[in-house]
Amino acid sequence: MTDENPTAGPSLDTLASLCKRRGFVFQSSEIYGGFESTWDYGPLGVELKRNVKQAWWQAMVRERDDIVGIDASILMSPKVWEASGHTANFNDPLVECKGCRRRFREDELEAGAACPECGGELSDARQFNTMFKTFVGPIEEEAATAYLRPETAQGIFVNFENVLTSTRKKLPFGIAQQGKSFRNEITTGNFIFRLREFEQMEMEFFVKPGEDEEWYQYWRQERLDWFVRLGARRERLRFREHEAEELSHYSTGTTDIEYYFPMGWSELEGIAKRGNYDLTQHAAASGKRLDYFDEPSGEHIVPYVVEPALGVDRAILVFLLDAYEEEEVRDEKRTVLKFHPALAPVKVAVLPLSRKETLAPTAQKVADLLRPHYMLQYDDAQSIGRRYRRQDEIGTPLCVTVDFDTLEDDAVTIRERDTMEQVRVPVAGLLDAVGERLPEIG
Ligand code: ATP
């Protein structure tokens, strides 16, 4: 298997340094030395993140008739986590080195391994619940203990009845959600791969019992295709089916879409068959009826669920790694992020050839023409070659150059990021010309 591995993207250090330099991702609380496994998105990162979330929402909700969205609270009744099994089962096996005292997840080490840091002996594993606990209200008493949600899915299950009655959806149908989740992870690191505070995009697809296998196959393929459509490299993606003993407490079958990260194959997205576990648990614990009235048969049924669950930050990492390329152009190194245009944080840059006063008003007018339609940067500092490189490095698909001829012929030059080809177009036709080159934005 190993010799069939694809080539990996750039190292995480290379990527993290570009991300910091250009304002994609910063270490959280950096001026205080950082805070482990939390990261902040900068001016370009926030655009990229919004674009990734929007592309998911578009594919999962807006372009479909059978999925609706919700936005539930992060803080929920603690009874939710009792019923879902998280209070009892959302554990990782923690081992500690008897020498250096570092902690690891036992299931990430080889059986019988010594401490990966110092070679010391490891303790027996103990179960560590990774939910963050907090107190709601001014008195720290048991009744007021709450958790920061470790997944967004439960907000969907507890709203099943509300969504069903307000939308009158018929099976099969799905409920989608995006939002923050929190896990007190034991092992962290690898840049934004594993975080303690992260964002998820999850969708619970409710189907008739017996139809879940078919939908499970459908969603596996659909989710893989989504990555490829948005520019992920197919050869760095693969399916990995979980072994029976790996399955989560709720799952009857799980596939990971794995990606070949610089540290090796790891989970990008999970697609799970959850049976009717969650609805049954919440119905029993709340005493409320959580089922579906099937008119044709006159029966109440508890739907089965298929869930694709993806981390936004992990998707961002993949799109960054797959976009990254270093090329030789006329004996110079060009670093370019070849983002799909829908994901690129900046769509168009407007660059006056020189800073001379004579060009500025025209260049500003060109920028004003495009700005309502496209995320845009206006850059007049340093040589034009340098400015192209800067835009390449943040993945801007198009640069529009305003030069001295523009004052005469009312035309500008469009330069494409990937081919570096340049074409001259009249300003009057610029909006259309840009639209043709960025067909999937708007
Ligand atoms: P692992 O076994 O790696 O801890 P998991 O199987 O528990 O992860 P899921 O519960 O299936 O993960 O979560 C669904 C998705 O959410 C994952 O595929 C991943 O993209 C994302 N995710 C989960 N935990 C984290 C985290 N700590 N940081 C960033 N993303 C995460």
Image (spheres, helix red, strand yellow):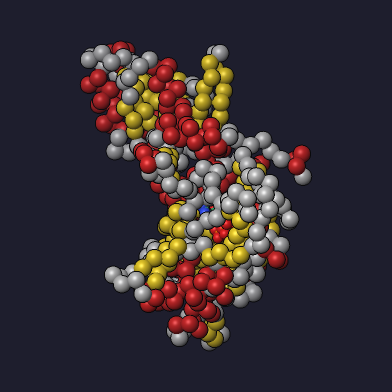
Answer yes or no: is residue 49 visible.
no
Q: Residue at x 61, y 39 (%)?
A: 262
Q: Quadrant of residue 325?
A: top right
Quadrant of the frame with the N terminus: top right
Quadrant of the frame with the C terminus: top left
Q: Residue at x 54, y 13 (%)?
A: 330
Q: Position of residue 299 (x, y in %)?
A: 54, 86
| On screen, residue 401 above or below 312 | above
Q: Position of residue 195 (x, y in %)?
A: 49, 51
Q: Residue at x 44, y 76 (%)?
A: 79
- Judge left or right: residue 112 versus residue 24: right
In this rendering, the count of numbered labels is 0
Answer yes or no: is residue 243 visible.
yes
- In depth, the one of 18 and 400 nearer the eye is 18
- In depth, the one of 83 and 414 nearer the eye is 83
| On screen, residue 415 above or below 236 | above
- In depth, the one of 439 and 387 nearer the eye is 387
Q: Residue at x 28, y 70 (%)?
A: 138
Ligand 1's quadrant: bottom right
- In depth, the one of 222 and 383 nearer the eye is 383
| On screen, residue 343 above or below 270 | above
Q: Position of residue 109 (x, y in %)?
A: 68, 53
Q: Position of residue 25 (x, y in %)?
A: 43, 39
